Image: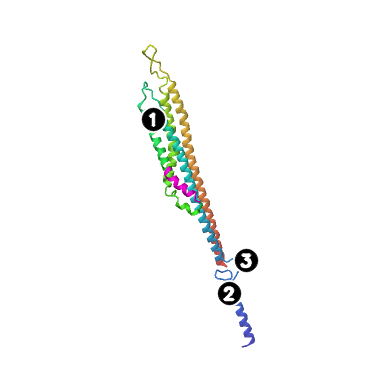
Amino acid sequence: MHPGVASVSAASSRGVVGEDNQQLSPGAGSDSPVPDGSVTYRDFVTSTYLDLMSANQHSVYALNWRRLYLSRAKLKASSRTSALLSGFAMVAMVEVQLDNNYDYPSGLLMAFSVCTTVLVAVHLFALMVSTCILPHIEAVSNIHNLNSVCESPHERMHRYIELAWGFSTALGILLFLAEVVLLCWIKFLPVDSGAVQPSTSGSQAHSPPGYAGWQAALASTIIMVPVGVIFVVFTVHFYRSLVLHKTERHNQEIEELHRLKVELDGHEKNVQVV
């Protein structure tokens, strides 16, 4: 073979090999180490995917543990509040002393009876839910293992936990305020009402009617009505702020995921162009 032809063939072969190495070096199929400590796109995508999966898995476990601790705190608060308020309601019903010489309005007595019964029933329901579910959550929360959160029934019993929480805090406290108002009317209404009183001579005397008891009961009602309005306003504001906080947190997470997606798409386009 002619020496010039041989040199041209060798040069062309070296050129082809050089072009192949230049095309495969940034690619995903090159098994040779990349110079200057750089990584290939496949390695980058793989490491990013593994990091995301690990972060998402830990985030899911952290969210489940947060829900577990929140459910446990709600059940504990519900059990304490329900036991306390239902005990007060029972004592108020038992210890109230009705004046036999005074003609109570039938509507007042019926309202007091219904309010006390509903109050005790609501708090006992919340107490029963707390007593049944709380031991299972406590048993799981004492195990220091990430996977043990799946054994807790707080996700399946979420509706009952929220129902007990609402009965104990919102509805139960409103009924307790109404119970206090009705108890004040029953206790103070017979005072200075012109009831028949026995005299020292053995005959019965009618005392002149007054308004001291009626004014005392009205004063307690005037005080309790703004307290009830403030309680309702605070409850609505609290739950609204809580929902807004959760919404903002979810929006931030969605924006973070969108930013990460844009960055990955940008890396993929740049590699395809190269």
Three-letter code, disc 3: Gly
Residue density around tag 3, few if under 14, some if 14–19, many if 20 or more, within 10 Å? few
Residue 81 at x, y percent in the picture:
46, 38
Specify the quadrant of the image occupied by residue 37.
bottom right
Q: Residue 20 carries which label?
A: 2
Q: How far apart in space, not on screen, are marks 2 and 3 (Cα)? A: 20 Å
- Give the mark nearest the N terminus, 3 or 1: 3
What is the CA distance from the residue labelled 1 to the residue labelled 2? 92 Å
- Magenta range is 131-143
- Name the amino acid type tagged 1: Phe
Q: Is residue 203 left or right of residue 260?
A: left
Relative to residue 228, is residue 210 depicted above or below?
Answer: above
Q: Where is residue 134 in the image (x, y as percent from the top left)?
A: 45, 45
Look at mark 3 in the image and give the residue it sits on: 37
Q: Are marks 3 and 1 in contact (CB under 8 Å)?
A: no
Q: Regarding mark 1 in the picture, which secondary structure is present there?
A: helix
Quarter in which the C terminus is drawn: bottom right
Is the residue marked by circle 1 packed among few (<14), some (14-19), or many (20+) residues within 10 Å? many
Q: Going by the picture, which residue comes out furthest to the left? A: 106
